[in-house]
């Protein structure tokens, strides 16, 4: 695996080098590298797109499309749609207002330094949620190309990026991000054309799933696959289409055997399976779990079960392992854990119907993505590298084009993955698909080169996003917490020092959090960051820009209530998935907890309206002036730069 | 009306308040108009998928229609909407400047 490693090292070295070069260059007075005053719309848009396309876009969407099929297409759609929403309702007014960060807007709009403090808490909270998936991307990429342990990749990558930010190498951020966009676009598209010429095109891949809706993909060769020993990846769902024979070369410790399909309460079900060498296993222990000796095999047969409501459902056995296990599969065996072709190809498959409320789940997902984009701490800042509102809007148009051009490709990876690399359904490592797929080529050198290109793209993805987040979050510490709360008289040097300490601190915390999330999907984690942003910042920005009656108290109450309610719903969901807590709630409540945006956003807005009406006396007296600054064209001369 | 900063302290001249209202209304109308088209599309896609199964089972050039819409065609749609919005909002700003200068 030396070729991919080489590509990664070149990417990292080039990023650091480019950053240092651009930083030095900026001292010569060129504005381009500092704030982008004279940057052309095209390069500025490249830089914004470069920062927006994170590990979730580069690795996560492809994996999620392979895992869930059609439903996962909402992710790229939502990421792009979110940007459009930002353009329509928030970008223009905020650029005119001259506030560069959300805490700046919070203070400037309500003349309340206290409100700035609350806004900072959310910058950090959303920031940390967004760094976790980037860290997972780093750990997974290194584990895939170098077979390092998961934690080692996180430590090395996290340390390198943190070092880079502390060094001040991020001053050259505009140029680095712009170059990284084009790298990512090349890395996600070019290898695909080679792969499609070998494994078949996009439409062919999709029509393979058209033939018989109840089929699942088959193994193309005998395979031994490692299964994790911790929830939620420790599961093997026997296929419901055909019988299967699974051998465990090193034995297995099975904690539980249940039904692979979700059954209504009160359904009688006995999993149908036989164990070779079954004399060794007391049959009475099947329900509780049992241990298989080395070389033992299980035969499973799907069965039709009639539920109390009269509906029949096809199901088979679901095994949960208590230790990492190797499982061997024969050639042309149906792939366990894979959704059937019908569920994969058609709307309302495995992702949105998980808890039985597909429409609710779909809309909540859309709301989180569309409203959440505005709440990401590193997105709005980038937007203000435009000289005026007009350039800002034109830049955003270009960003839409660049993002759209990129987002067409990840679903193609997912489709190819389902056809030629179904092993991932068993191991659960869907996020590694863009790196693993090229390795299947007959021409090994070509495979290594293409895999090197995608690895480099993945690195560009989490490096640019993590760097951007680290700068925003450390900035929040140094500027808002240290500079405004702890030592208001601190000198510039002291603040710079605080920024560096904060960067180290935030970097270390991010790495620690990254270790905790190996079993979660990258795209799912990103969605959680979006959901919290959607219920806290989005209402603040939308209402703050368009409703004069919003008071400090109303905005605070809405943001805190919406934000924290969503946050607690999400943290609880994470703990349930990890089996840290067991909580039995109805499927409806479970859907609403996993996708909180559909109630979080209205809750937040409603709270803002009600509390603002009750505290109408504290509407800022100069609210009309503020509205003038938010909405009047610059040429009328009402805009001010709030931040010097 | 006055665009002089010194005159615009805490209490705005009633003319200026009226100006703010006019500008906000025109911008809001444009944003809401484009936003509504977009929101209607976002709401309609899941509903069509659910209630018009014929769409789900039809193909265009080997692509299932829902997949073609969401995985490919959606992105050019966002380009068209944002291009229209950017153009219209530039025209609107130019119009506002012309109108207000005319008044003063």
Image (cartoon, grey):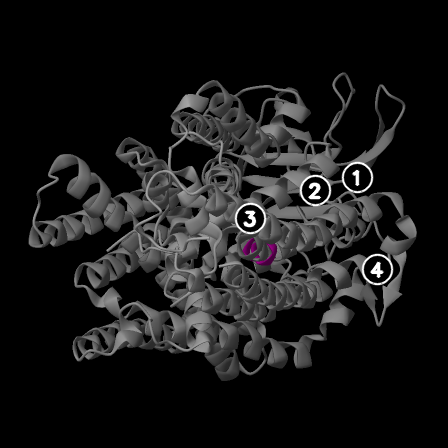
Quadrant where the N terminus of chain A is found in the figure: bottom left
**Left or right for A534, reference A237:** left
Disc 4 secondary structure class: loop
Is A351 located above or below residue A150 in the figure? Answer: above
Assess whether mark 1 and mark 2 are in contact (beta carbons under 8 angstroms). Answer: yes
- The picture places residue A2, in percent across and down from the top left corner, at 36, 76
Labels 2 and 1: the sequence-earlier one: 2
Q: What residue is drawn where x is 75% and y is 52%?
A: B41
**Left or right for A528, reference A247:** left
As drawn, the label of residue B24 is 3
Chain letter for mark 1, please: A
Instruction: Please state which of the two labelled residues, at mark 4 or mark 3, is closer to the viewer.
Output: 3
Chain letter for mark 4, please: A
Quadrant where the C terminus of chain A is found in the figure: bottom left
Q: Which residues are magenta?
A: A79-83
Is A554 located above or below residue A204 in the figure? Answer: above
Q: Residues within 10 Å of mark 4 (few under 14, many from 20)?
A: many
Chain letter for mark 3, please: B
Q: CA distance from mark 2 to mark 3?
A: 59 Å
As drawn, the label of residue A302 is 1
Q: Which residue is mark 4?
A: A210
Is A77 in the magenta?
no
Disc 3 secondary structure class: helix
Nearest the camera: A397 or A531? A397
């Amino acid at each position: 695996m030396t070729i991919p490693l080489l590509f990664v090292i070149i990417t990292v070295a080039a990023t650091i080098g480019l950053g240092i070069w651009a930083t030095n260059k900026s001292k010569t007075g060129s504005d381009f590298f500092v704030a982008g005053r004279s940057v052309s719309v095209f390069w500025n848009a490249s830089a914004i797109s470069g920062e927006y396309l994170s590990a979730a876009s580069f690795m996560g969407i492809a994996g999620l499309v392979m895992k869930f099929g059609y439903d996962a297409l909402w992710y790229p759609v939502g990421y792009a749609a979110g940007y459009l929403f930002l353009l329509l309702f928030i970008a223009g007014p905020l650029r005119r207002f001259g506030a560069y960060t959300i805490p700046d807007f919070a203070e400037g709009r309500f003349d309340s330094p206290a409100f700035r403090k609350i806004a900072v808490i959310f910058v950090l909270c959303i920031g940390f949620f967004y760094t976790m998936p980037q860290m997972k991307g780093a750990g997974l990429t290194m584990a895939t190309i170098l077979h390092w342990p998961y934690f080692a990749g996180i430590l090395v990558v996290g340390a390198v990026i943190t070092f880079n930010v502390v060094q001040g190498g991020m001053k050259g951020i505009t140029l680095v991000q712009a170059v990284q966009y084009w790298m990512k676009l090349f890395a996600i598209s070019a290898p695909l054309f080679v792969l499609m010429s070998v494994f078949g095109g996009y439409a062919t891949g999709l029509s393979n799933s058209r033939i018989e809706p109840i089929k699942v993909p088959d193994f193309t060769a005998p395979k031994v696959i490692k299964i994790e020993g911790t929830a939620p990846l420790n599961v093997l769902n026997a296929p419901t289409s055909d019988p299967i024979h699974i051998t465990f070369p090193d034995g297995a410790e099975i904690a539980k055997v249940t039904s692979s399909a979700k059954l209504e309460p009160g359904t009688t079900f006995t999993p149908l399976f036989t164990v070779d060498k079954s004399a060794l296993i007391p049959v009475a222990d099947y329900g509780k779990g049992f241990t298989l000796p080395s070389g033992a095999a299980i035969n499973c047969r799907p069965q039709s079960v009639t539920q109390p409501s009269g509906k029949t459902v096809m199901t088979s056995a679901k095994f949960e392992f208590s230790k990492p296990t190797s499982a061997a599969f024969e050639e042309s065996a149906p792939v366990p854990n894979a959704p059937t072709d019908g569920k994969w190809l058609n709307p309302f498959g495995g992702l949105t119907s998980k808890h039985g409320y597909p429409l609710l789940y779909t809309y909540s997902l859309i709301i989180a993505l569309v409203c959440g984009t505005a709440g990401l701490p590193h997105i709005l800042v980038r937007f203000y590298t435009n000289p005026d509102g007009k350039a800002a809007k034109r830049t955003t148009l270009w960003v839409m084009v660049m993002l759209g051009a990129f987002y067409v490709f990840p679903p193609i990876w997912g489709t190819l993955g389902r056809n030629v690399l179904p092993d991932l359904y068993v191991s659960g490592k869907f996020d590694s698909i863009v790196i693993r797929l090229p390795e299947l080529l007959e021409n090994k050198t070509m495979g290594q080169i293409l895999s090197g290109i995608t690895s480099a793209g993945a690195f560009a993805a989490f490096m640019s996003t993590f760097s951007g987040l680290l700068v925003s979050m450390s900035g929040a510490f140094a500027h808002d917490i240290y500079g405004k709360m702890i030592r208001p008289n601190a000198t510039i040097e002291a603040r710079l020092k605080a920024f560096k300490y904060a960067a180290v601190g935030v970097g270390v915390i991010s790495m620690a959090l990254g270790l905790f999330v190996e079993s979660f999907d990258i795209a799912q984690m990103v969605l959680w960051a979006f959901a919290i942003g959607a219920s806290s910042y989005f209402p603040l920005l939308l209402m703050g820009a368009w409703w004069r009656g919003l008071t400090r108290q109303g905005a605070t109450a809405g943001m805190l209530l919406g934000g924290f309610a969503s946050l607690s719903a999400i943290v609880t969901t994470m703990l349930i998935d990890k089996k840290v807590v067991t909580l039995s709630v109805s499927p409806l409540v479970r859907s609403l907890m996993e996708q909180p945006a559909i109630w979080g956003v209205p809750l937040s807005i409603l709270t803002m309206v009600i509390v603002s009406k009750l505290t109408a006396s504290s509407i800022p007296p100069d609210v009309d002036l503020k509205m003038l600054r938010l909405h009047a064209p610059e040429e009328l001369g009402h805009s001010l730069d709030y931040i010097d | 009306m006055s665009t002089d900063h010194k005159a615009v302290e805490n209490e705005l001249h009633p003319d200026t308040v009226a100006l703010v209202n006019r500008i906000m209304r025109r911008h809001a109308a444009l944003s809401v108009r484009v936003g509504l088209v977009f929101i209607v599309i976002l709401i309609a896609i899941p509903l069509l998928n659910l209630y018009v199964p014929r769409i789900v089972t039809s193909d265009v050039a080997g692509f299932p229609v829902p997949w073609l819409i969401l995985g490919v065609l959606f992105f050019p749609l966002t380009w068209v909407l944002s291009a229209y919005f950017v153009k219209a909002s530039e025209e609107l700003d130019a119009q506002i400047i012309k109108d207000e200068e005319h008044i003063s």
